[in-house]
Image (cartoon, grey):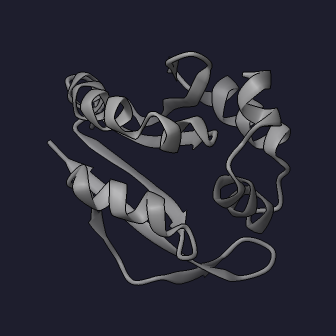
Amino acid sequence: MAFVAENMRQADREELEALGQDSEEGIWQAFRASEQAWVMQEDAPMCVFGVIPTNLLTGEGIIWLLGTDNVKRHARGFLEVSPRCLQKIMATYSHLHNYVDQRNKASIRWLKWMGFEFQAAQPLGPRGLPFHRFDKRA
């Protein structure tokens, strides 16, 4: 966890800052609120991700992922494993959602590739920067 916080990719760091958090605070807050969280790694951690349950009766949760530049270095492995991870998560959660900073183009491309649907950007956080809500239903 500390490795990812210290080596977080710039786009994720900027996204957390837009929401009023630093990388260490953001990663630990998401981790503590999550029912489950995982670390994906090759030679070193690539990312940490998890789901924060919002409604257990309806199977709704907030999915999140914070990564390092190792995601790009090991893109092939990341892209091979990501759909399997999502499939396992969706066995428990029938509706996943969150927000992504409009500037975070790589994450937006990946989320669309993973099948998430996007809404128009809306101001979010203390600076009012545009964020897209994204959703995926089973």
Of residue 73 and residue 25, the one placed in the foreground of this image is 73
- Asked if residue 65 shows in the view, the reply is yes
Vertical side of 40 occupied by 110: above or below: below
Residue reaching furthest left? 138
Vertical side of 52 occupied by 72: above or below: below
Where on the picture, by quarter, is residue 68? top right
Left-right relation of 99 to 90? right
Of residue 103 and residue 138, the one placed in the foreground of this image is 103
Left-right relation of 89 to 4? left
Left-right relation of 61 to 66? left
Estimate the x, y position of residue 117 in percent, counting from the top left: 25, 65
Estimate the x, y position of residue 107 in percent, counting from the top left: 46, 58
How many numbered discs, if any? 0
Q: Residue at x 77, y 34 (%)?
A: 5
Estimate the x, y position of residue 115 in percent, counting from the top left: 20, 54
Q: Where the C terminus falls, by quadrant? A: top left
Of residue 11 and residue 91, the one placed in the foreground of this image is 11
Q: Where the N terminus falls, by quadrant? A: top right
- Asked if residue 64 shows in the view, the reply is no
Vertical side of 47 occupied by 41: above or below: above
Estimate the x, y position of residue 125 in percent, counting from the top left: 72, 71
Left-right relation of 68 to 36? right
Q: Residue at x 83, y 39 (%)?
A: 25
Of residue 69 and residue 132, the one placed in the foreground of this image is 69
Q: Residue at x 69, y 24 (%)?
A: 32
Q: Residue at x 24, y 56 (%)?
A: 113
